[in-house]
Amino acid sequence: MSRPVQFNTNVKVVEMPEGYSGEGFFATSFDKVIGLARKNSIWPLPFATSCCGIEFMATMAAHYDLARFGSERLGFTPRQCDLLMVMGTIAKKMGPVLRQVYLQMAEPRWVIAVGACASSGGIFDTYSVLQGIDQIIPVDVYVPGCPRARKRSSTA
Ligand code: SF4
């Protein structure tokens, strides 16, 4: 089976911040440099459970190779990451753990709810499953849908 990876010939370079430039020098303020780095080098912390977590692991593995976008710097410590990626079904029992991980991350921090379960409980409308992680932590981006359902329909 051929590898789905293509060479990226459409690489974009970010604009430089406002500042003063002359022959051989460029000067700007420290907060603009920090902001530029922060905006373009997000460090994700994966919080993966159930099938969405497995989908994420497959995306990171050699076949799909997410690292080719330069986005592979996953951290497994809240202290060094600024993007919490919640992928999978979150049981109510796990809620306090997720909240603690979120609170341990330094500001500024962002949260992505990946998949129907993390966003809304998905198909698990039961007493034991949290009906969306936004019941316990703020969410910045919701990624709707269920990869497992897509796979089911594509192989039916
Ligand atoms: S959204 Fe679908 S793939 Fe993701 S955890 Fe829920 S059931 Fe599994």
Image (tube, grey):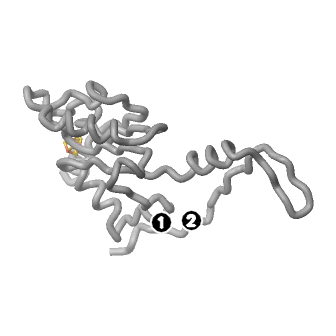
Image coordinates of residue 68 in percent, x first then y, are 47, 66
- Residue 68 has which mark? 1
| Label 2 sits on residue | 8
Residue shown at the point (48%, 38%) measured from the top left: 108
Identity of the amino acid at label 2?
A: Asn
Placement of 140 over or under 155, stated as above or below: above
Q: Are marks 2 and 1 in contact (CB under 8 Å)?
A: yes
In the drawing, does residue 120 fall left or right of residue 142? left
- Residue 111 has which mark? none
Image coordinates of residue 43 in percent, x first then y, are 45, 52
Q: Nearer the viewer, residue 55 or 97?
A: 97
Element under disc 1: helix
Residue shown at the point (56%, 65%) measured from the top left: 8
Image coordinates of residue 143 in percent, x first then y, are 36, 38
Q: Quadrant of residue 94?
A: top left
In what quadrant of the picture does the N terminus appear? bottom left
Element under disc 2: loop
The mark nearer the N terminus, 2 or 1, is 2
Identity of the amino acid at label 1?
A: Arg
Placement of 82 over or under 134, stated as above or below: below
In the drawing, does residue 36 fall left or right of residue 135? right
